[in-house]
Image: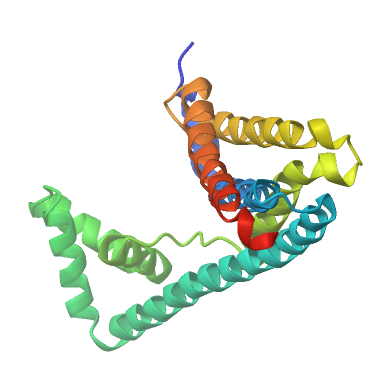
Amino acid sequence: MSLLHEHQHTPEAIRARLSESPSSPYLKEWVYGGIDGVVTTFAVVAGVVGAGLSPIVIVILGLANLVGDGFSMAAGCYSGTKTDSDNYERLRAIEISHIERYPEGEREEVRQIYASKGFEGDALEKIVATITRDRDLWLDVMMVEEYGLSGHQPSAFKAALFTFLSFMICGAMPLLPYLLGVDLGVAFPLALFLSAMTFFLIGAAKSLWSVHSWLWHGFETLAIGLSAAGLAYGIGYGLQGLAQ
């Protein structure tokens, strides 16, 4: 089975596909929030267990980390996404001003852009005339060609929300055994298993937007996550004497 999504190529299917607005599944936010949630929360669990501290410490620090870091990540994601959107609006306003004040100079920019793509003569002049006849189209072309920016900017609120939800859901996995009062003899191995499973599932889900297999992404993400968890456990174990 092909790993690439196949489109239909009938005229009707092409027309319908091109008329749709590009949708963003906020994949980056889901993956980043999920991985960071599991890593940071399991790091707390592993560090406390490695230091030989009480399970109640795991619950207190784990929940504090889950809510605090989740909100912090969401706030950072909101600010970063909003900054990108604001920058897009700033650059678009500059282009509007240039088109109004220096229309011939902006037409020449369009001409040189498409000349660099191999168009020339009458074909080039028709392209320039067609684009510059519609100001919105003209602006869209300049934003893409000059700045590499699409007009479809992600919502800062949605990006922050998805980051927070992903962080909270995935980050809760290492805490479940302790929140549910599982016997301490199996709580940490179960937390490790749930964390590993979550890492693997996050990676496997990434394969929906990749040419690599779900196994590749699953084990890749698992290796990254367990490396961070192992480091946290090792530090906690090495410093356990300070807590006693």
- Residue 21 visible within the image: no
Q: Where does the image place residue 18, in percent across and percent down from the top left?
A: 49, 41
Q: Which residue in the rendered view is the most extreme toward the left?
A: 121
Q: Which residue in the rendered view is the most extreme toward the right?
A: 181
Judging depth in this view, the residue of 28 and 46 nearest the camera is 46
**Which residue lies at the image location 63% right of the left edge and 54% below the top edge?**
240
* Relative horizontal placement of residue 55, taking residue 146 as reference (left or right): right
Q: How is the image coloured?
A: rainbow
Judging depth in this view, the residue of 233 and 224 nearest the camera is 233
Q: Where does the image place residue 183, in percent across and percent down from the top left?
A: 88, 34
- Residue 72 visible within the image: yes
Q: How many marks?
A: 0
The quarter of the picture where the C terminus appears is: bottom right
Q: Is residue 34 above or below residue 10?
A: below
Q: Where does the image place residue 178, in percent across and percent down from the top left?
A: 84, 44
Q: Quadrant of residue 198?
A: top right
Q: Where does the image place residue 59, in percent across and percent down from the top left?
A: 82, 54
**Which residue lies at the image location 81% right of the left edge and 32% below the top edge?**
185
**Which residue lies at the image location 24% right of the left edge and 80% below the top edge?**
103
Q: Is residue 132 above or below residue 170?
A: below
